[in-house]
Image: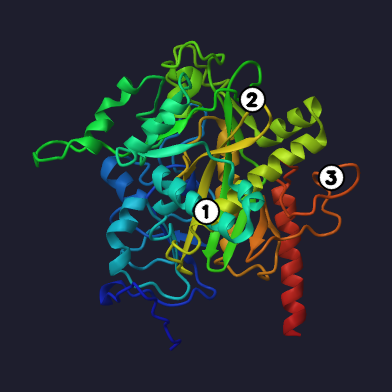
Amino acid sequence: MSKINRVPGYMQSKGNRNRGPIGDREIRYKCSMQNTILDVLRARPGWQEVSGPNTAGNQQQQGQKGSSSGSQQSKDKNGTTGASSSGGTTSAKTSDGDWDFYWCDREWLHANYDTMFLQEHQKILHFRNHYELTRKNLMVKNLKRLRKQTEREMGKKEAESFDFFPTTYELPSEYHIFVEEFKKNPGIIWIMKPAAKSQGRGIFLFRKLKDITDWKKGEYQPLTDPNREVPETYVVQRYIEDPYLIGGRKFDIRVYVLVVSYNPLKVWLYRSGFARFSNSRFSLDSIEDAYVHLTNVAVQKTAPDYDPDKGCKWATQQLRQYLTAKHSADAARKVFQGIDNIIIKSLQSVQKIIINDKHCFEMYGYDVLLDANLKPWLIEINASPSLTASGKDDYDLKYGVLNDVLNVLDLENRLTGKEKRVGGFDLIWDDGPVLADDGSMECSVNGTSTTANSFLGCHCERKKQLREIYTAAQALKKTAVS
């Protein structure tokens, strides 16, 4: 019997022992989501669904008793949502611990991580304390700390590479510090965001201190009454008043980043993403209008004149082409290099804090805003970016992203482990910057390739590339055996 490595922080549960390394058998998976990821898993050859608490299959069975379709969820009019069983097997195992791969939600992980025992080959979504990067207040706290450390050790010039997040304070704990900054800059606009909410919930803009008096109470008035509600933690940020506009509308860019290890840091960047536009023309005259200032799809789709067929999205490739045509290839290249810098610096800021575990991985959704000078700003980082499609193009994008996450993780052991590109993912950091191979000309400038192995917004023929690397890896393995 193969030796099982015990991982610190896990406790063995005799009732949840897996049957051992995968080998040539089917790959057993669990999934707690009923959206595109379930479609991807069910369509993957050789993968078999495991039932149990907190799984999509169990939720469907409970919600569809009496339905002849069983585990198949009906699709919407675009044919883009819901879980289907096409192409894969959906027969379920009965043992809750009998799985190799688990796409779980954050709440389940928090409740179960410390009482679990994972075997060598098992993979699970989310690192234990992923919130160090994805809670807005902790993200800024960690970035500020690394910026100060960099300035102390390497000087102010190098510390300027962290100048990609707006002036930010946590409320109510830093209310008095914020007031001092507020008084230095009268008349400017600030934006308030709940530290732990997403999809634009609870966000508002303000110009006057009287608009945030609820958070002043938490700082200056002792909570002598135990029944008195403590103000929710918010971050207050200087609002970017001069965003880059296309067609008079504000937008931000969603970027998909896969981290498979924090120690050493190993980061993959997906070539495709999208720009999310506001439904209304930008103006500072009405700071209370969420349809003008918030680009979240969850907000925009509630606009009275929102067109679900038209949507408010551009592919990242389309955005890069637009910037290249309007400004220059070099200007567009600098924009995307700036986004690369944001990704690496933010991950480095939590590299020593995140509890690294070889069983865990994280797929982040970065949101980046461009200002009028084409400078990229980090808005937020999501540990659970939306996987529900808003249309066919959005479904195809997310389906490809998720499929390639599984391809990079390679539970089937089809790769060599030395690949710099897998489908739409490019390896941009592997305990240091990764350089592009000669001939990587997908985003060439004046006939020369970019130096870094980063191709955000570049050409992405993922299916063709996958065929090529699997063929090459198979041939290499055969050669090694012979």
**Position of 405 relative to 214 (above/below):** below
Q: Please state if 53 lies on the left or on the right of 424 as rendered.
A: left
**Position of 369 relative to 16 (above/below):** above
Q: Which residue: 44% across, 43% down?
A: 83
Residue 88 in sight here: no
Q: What residue type is labelled 1?
A: Lys
Q: Where is residue 48 in the image (x, y as percent from the top left)?
A: 45, 60
* Label 2 – label 1 distance at C-alpha: 29 Å
Find residue 148 and name its label.
1
Q: What residue type is labelled 2?
A: Tyr
**SS at badge 1:** helix
Find residue 444 and name its label.
3
In this rendering, the label closer to the viewer, 2 or 3? 2
Q: Which residue: 52% across, 44% down?
A: 365
Q: Position of residue 175 (x, y in %)?
A: 33, 36
Q: In terms of image quadrants, where is residue 45? A: bottom right
Q: Which residue lies furthest to the right in this view?
A: 447
Q: Position of residue 142 (x, y in %)?
A: 46, 52
Mark sitting earlier along the chain (3/1): 1
Q: Mark 2 points at which residue?
A: 244
